[in-house]
Image: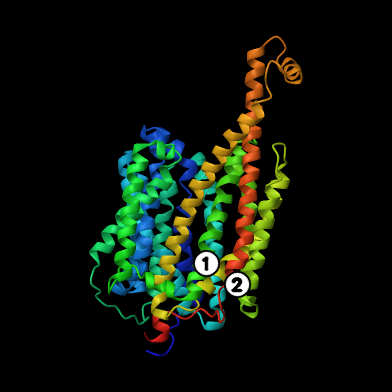
Amino acid sequence: MSTEFRPPNLALSTVGLSLATFMQVLDTTIANVSLPTIAGNLGVSSNQSTWVITSFAVSNAIALPLTGFLTRRFGETKLFVWATLLFSLASFLCGIAQSMSMLILFRAIQGAVAGPMYPITQSLLISIYPPAKRGMALALLAMVTVVAPIAGPILGGWITDNYAWPWIFFINVPIGIFASFVVANQMKGRPEVTEKPKVDYVGLITLIIGVGALQVVLDKGNDEDWFSSTFIIVTAIIAAIGLAVFLIWELTDKDPIVNLKLFRHRNFAMGTLCLVLAYAAFFAIGLLVPQWLQRNVGYTSTWAGFAAAPLGILPVILTPFVGRYAHKFDLRLLASGAFIVMGATCFMRSDFFLDIDFYSVAMVQLIQGLGVALFFMPVLTILLSDLQPREIAAGSGLATFLRTLGGSFAASITTFMWDHRAIVHHERLAENITPFNPTAQQALNQIGPGDPQYAAAAVNQMITQQGYQISFNEVFHVLGYVFVGLIFVVWLAKPPFAAKAGPAASGH
């Protein structure tokens, strides 16, 4: 078993693996723009419809760290094929759901079976490519990770407007069946060693309770006004207790369900820290820019999608070059370059204003794409570089889980800060609008002569918009410094950075 396994058709295997991953990552965002339509069709409030997103995120976050355990039990190929088929089935069930509770249940199932798909794709791609081309495989996966979330809202909006919302789920069915058939066929002769590890029930139960509750807190915190809500307080306490017991148990158990000892590897620890913080900041940008365009600049959701879309252009163009030539450079230099570009674009956005034109917004997105193109592949290679071959699936699952959790934290914190700071700036700006300020009174008379109520409402609207704009600029200033700080973190990793092959390649 020492000979490395190569599938009969490497290109076809890569297409099968990438398609399934693209479909799964796409589904994390495709439903977002369709929520109002789904809520209307199923007769529920828009607040209830957000559980369509939350249920997927919660079960996905729980399933991700279990990847290592599941691959030991079933083998990578079998787990990938079955997860993809079950994802297709769950997608079909989402499409035919007749009530919101049914849709939420099927979305939870979809999120759970999607969990292992991305980490196993990473592990399989590394194992089937020769060492010199493993960077190319990781770069391709990085491109999928970037492009799919951008394409999700645009594709989701187009399908919902032109067909019907169930089709955002139905399109997964043929893709999933094709991908699982291709991978099963191509990986037929791949040798795998499975074992029957004992199920760490305490770890599993505390993981489900702790991570599930934490994800609900992060997803629902802003809607419920955080800790002024009894629901959020109780859920946060449950999350804290669950996660504390989980961490203590997993670090002391002989055969833990999630192997936290992987952090003993320096590059895995530093690479994962970089991945989590950089992805969190990147996720915050992807969330705030379209919201700001719609809420403050007056764009429709479609045009906001178009303005954000140039972000994906350079990653698509540059991926083959990054994959082919990255190993000739110190990967820490490439990652530092990525953080400089992404930090610079954040500082550019901190100078945005309400009357900014489409071209300026789109150009900053395009420039950020250069940073994104240089970010994922080097950081993924660094974090996988000092893992043993049999640890890659578990390490990838754990890093992807923490990355996902980082995105959830970023979404909650940046949305809260944007709203909170907007209120502070509104108060400060409104302080000068008084009957004793002749300049303010003159402005009110010009806006609404003879109609003080209209004038006051118009000024209040202008102040609100300016408050949100100043707050938006502040948040991007902070995000810029986050990227600058990550330059120092990535240099704590140590060469060599060659990604090792998976179990089949090494004979483990």
Displayed quadrant of residue 140:
bottom right
- The quadrant of the image that shows the N terminus is bottom left
Give the answer, above or below, for where 111 lies relative to 37: below
In the image, taking residue 276 as reference, residue 300 lies left or right, namely right
Give the CA distance from mark 1 to mark 2. Answer: 24 Å
Q: Earlier in the sequence, mark 1 or mark 2?
A: 1
Q: Nearer the viewer, residue 187 or 277?
A: 277
Disc 1 target residue: 141
Q: Residue at x 37, y 80 (%)?
A: 190
User: Which three-letter amino acid code belongs to the residue tagged 2?
Assistant: Trp
Q: Residue at x 54, y 53 (%)?
A: 283
Determine which of the numbered discs, if any, sits on residue 364 in the image. none
User: Which three-letter amino acid code belongs to the residue tagged 1?
Assistant: Leu
Disc 2 target residue: 491
Q: Residue 246 location in percent, x, y?
A: 31, 61
Q: Of helix, strand and loop, which one carries label 2?
A: loop
Residue farthest along the front direction in this orientation: 436
Q: Residue at x 31, y 74 (%)?
A: 72
Q: Nearer the viewer, residue 235 or 325?
A: 235
The image shows a total of numbered marks equal to 2
Q: Residues within 10 Å of mark 2 (few under 14, many from 20)?
A: some
Q: Residue 500 location in percent, x, y?
A: 48, 81
Q: Residue 327 location in percent, x, y?
A: 61, 79
Q: Residue at x 53, y 62 (%)?
A: 144
Q: Residue 486 location in percent, x, y?
A: 59, 63
In the image, taking residue 185 as reference, residue 314 lies left or right, namely right
Q: Residues within 10 Å of mark 1 (few under 14, many from 20)?
A: many
Q: Nearer the viewer, residue 503 or 458?
A: 458
Q: Which is more foreground, mark 1 or mark 2?
A: 2
